[in-house]
Image (cartoon, rainbow, N blue to C red):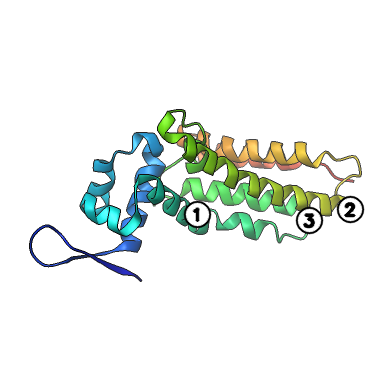
Amino acid sequence: MEITACQPTKGRPREFDTDSALTSALRVFWTKGYEGASLSDLTEAMGITRPSLYAAFGNKEALFKKTLDLYQREKLDYMGKALDAPTARGVAERLLTGALEMQMSTCDPKGCMGVINSVACGTEAESIRAEVLARGAIVKQSLIDRFERAKAEGDLPADTDVIGLTAYLFALLQGIALQAGSGTSCVDLKKLIDTSLACWPSK
């Protein structure tokens, strides 16, 4: 655990837990989005001053990218594990189940941080939107590659459109996040997953 000391204007150096502060910043960005999160929102949640924020994390954009790293590492770790499933259907099931479990958690905000910030439209947020979309493209390509391998191995029909299948799966993942955020129950979302998997292409 890293402890950062920042020199305030008066008194002794102030120490704070950077990991805890970063987690707090993640919740603010996750809840309000990049554009909606003000520096005052961030410093209040993190329990630090603006000079301390700049000293420890850089500017707002740099802080956001660090929280996005944390989000991917801790909240989306199920995605990397899903790719290790022995079948393409197993990959899809792990992804959808993982997304549902994350949305049903009582510890985190609802919705998808990537979706929230990929639709940011202000001039200030252009680089943020590009960053989020670029990271999403990497994940999508990994999934396309996994489904291409599944098709080559005979796990998926030879005429499967793996790009379309990947887009379909991502639409489901985003839909789960959006519906969970609007109050859809776990039971109804589980039915959505079951129906989607029942339609999964097979030989």
Extreme-bottom residue of the structure = 1
The residue beneath circle 1 is 75
Q: Position of residue 141 (x, y in %)?
A: 70, 48
- Nearest the viewer among 115 and 59 is 59
Q: Amino acid at mark 1?
A: Lys
Q: Which mark is residue 96?
A: none
Identify the residue at image location x=75%, y=47%.
144
Q: CA distance from mark 3 to mark 2?
A: 12 Å
Q: Amino acid at mark 3?
A: Thr
- The crowd level at tag 1 (other Cα within 10 Å; few <14, some 14-19, many 20+) is some
The residue beneath circle 3 is 87
Q: Give the mark nearest the N terminus, 1 or 2.
A: 1
The residue beneath circle 2 is 152
Q: Position of residue 59 (x, y in %)?
A: 34, 48
Q: CA distance from mark 1 to mark 3?
A: 23 Å
The image quarter containing residue 12 is bottom left
Of helix, strand and loop, which one carries label 3? Answer: loop
